Image (spheres, rainbow, N blue to C red):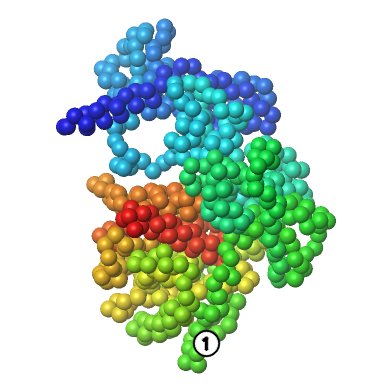
Amino acid sequence: MSRPVYILVALLLCAFAIDAAERKSPIVYVVKRGDTLSEIAARYRVSQRQIKRWNKLRSSRIRAGQSLKVGLPVQSGDWYRVRRGDTLSKIARQFSVPVYRLKAINRLNGDVIHVGQKLRLQPAAPVRSASTDDHDEEQREYTVRPGDTLSKIALRFDVGLSFLRQLNQLKSDLIRPGQKLRLRASRLDEAVHVVQEGETLTEIARRYRASVSQLQRLNALVGDRILIGQKLRLKDAESTVHIVERGDALWEIARAYGISVYRLKILNGLRSNRIYPGQELKLYPDRKLEPNAAPTSGPRLATYVVQRGDYLAQIARLHQMSVAEITRINKLKRNAVIHPGDRLKVRPMRWVELSEIDWDDLQIHRADTPKIASGNGPYYFSRPRNKRQPSKTYYEDHPSPPSKTYRQAMRLWREFESKVGRMGRLSSRLEGWHIVLDPGHGGLDPGAVVLTRDGNGKRLYVVEDEYVFDIALRVYVLVRLHGGHATMTLLSPNHLIRQNEPATQTFVNEKNEVYNLAAYNHWPRGSNLSTRVRIARQALAKAPRGRRIFLSFHADIEPKAPEAPLVLYYKSSKSGRTDRVSRQFARSLLPALGAGARVRGQGLGVLRNNPADVKVLIELRNMAYRDHVWALRFEDLRHRDAEKVVHGLLDHAARATRRAGY
């Protein structure tokens, strides 16, 4: 090992030694009015059982003013100095570390310990550089070390300085060694709550330390009746502040309010484009603090024209407003009735300006391509027998053999490609890039079929493959309009981009998509992942190295996963071999995909032996959450998902160009 490497390792070991902290007594938490034991446990990432044991509680009942001992979870490298009366089992209980693990970490042969002995509570983190770090979970809490400043911590953990103050309720930037700082918001800090089965308004109010009357006012509720999947606003925001929700991205917030990303970062002390759920973003300068700031015309508002079937709560939800806010801005009476054609002032959160693209111009108007108008269309040649998906098990087979279906799909696709080619360009930022777009599932495999309900409680069903196909087509159009070359792995014989007006007219499970390769004239199945890879190999065969991307689109259905986009890169479940280049690409997409987005490695067949330089599978939504199923039904929000993906591609292309020195 050369001398510089020795020095680097020594410095890293010193850094870890400095990070390791001595753990002493548990902290003392004073119960506040409205607190529950479960909320306190969640806040400090411990179990209710542990808090009961530490405080010798016989039940979960607690009272305001009560002092509770809480042993915070240990961090990597933390240690404890043995005191008189300590035993190994007592220390293990105090820090929730099994005795056998304490023995292993400290290489103890028995249970004998001595006063003054230094015991490791967790092993020190391994010495590795950031480029080889396999850890995908972000740290949520940090113990202040000697020499730390709040700004250094904000920079180190990629969190805005003002957000760090907000999370920890700091009135100044003064911090002290040993102080615990939260780095990420919990669900209790967020601005919205989606009603789950069995919840009551009273329970939700208690959990978020709000009153029932406050929730009723914010959400225009009459009485205590709430619906599963209903999205409740938890707090109001000044018109000069935007509270970040899951999925919000800095670039789209800036665009919506007519502010530059640079200005938004300056206003909020941000060093990067990452933002987090619950973060409060200033939209305009504080005149007291910035008297010389350029004048602004005040909070920017947009106009929304009420459509047939709209109701006030839905309009508020689409624009990330409370019903109380939309009522106040429009000077409406409580429980006001709205009518089609009414014009409402709203926050400019119709994130997608669909007018940027003339989607009607992409429809096919040819005598030999019969077009069938439909509330969930348009369709070409044929349409589903049903107007909407009627049940979880319903499907419609295509009457033609796959070879004939392929020929029909190619005929429709060539006309569509020609239309896209004549639309001109938004930019040339993806010039020279080749991107394969893989709509998840399709053909005989519809993916997840999930039940949801509309605002009136009516049952609706959403079919995963039909919706991700629509999103993939929108990505295709945007990639082409930015100068890129794009290839779809699947094609449909009877539809292209679709609208569904109203959103209750859901897409029907038709088992008719075919592979976009003449040699594979059979219906796609869930197990035919290798065929998608073969299509990618052919599509990318002549593409320049370094500019080949593969994206597979899905909608997750995992109740244990957060309700936020997930980007998966290849990591072998057997050997642990990791596609590090794709992992870095996955991480670089997070700012574009929005607050709460995350990455994970997984041994996925569609990414294994894939010829693309970078390849990921994106779970755009999590259909285990009613709110995400709700969002997929709206064309504007599907297009928003597509724009997020393309924005991430544009960022990636720009970085690659800078690295190449162009």
Image quarter of the N terminus: top left
Does 12 sit above or below residue 195? above
Q: Is residue 483 above or below residue 231?
A: below
Q: Locate residue 540 relative to residue 495 in the image: left or right.
A: left
Dot 1 amino acid type = His
Residue closest to the eye, 282 or 562: 282
| Residue 531: quarter of image | bottom left
Q: Residue at x 41, y 69 (%)?
A: 483
Look at the image and tell me in which quarter the C terminus lies: bottom left
Q: In this view, which residue lies farthest toward the left?
A: 1
Name the residue carrying label 1: 365
Q: Position of residue 431 (x, y in %)?
A: 37, 67
Q: Is residue 472 left or right of residue 541?
A: right
Q: Nearer the viewer, residue 330 or 376?
A: 330
- Image location (x, y in percent) of residue 426: 48, 69
Q: Is residue 367 above or below residue 156?
A: below
Position in image of residue 265 (x %, y %): 54, 45
Q: Is residue 335 above or below residue 69?
A: below
Dot 1: element: loop
Q: Residues within 10 Å of mark 1 (few under 14, many from 20)?
A: few
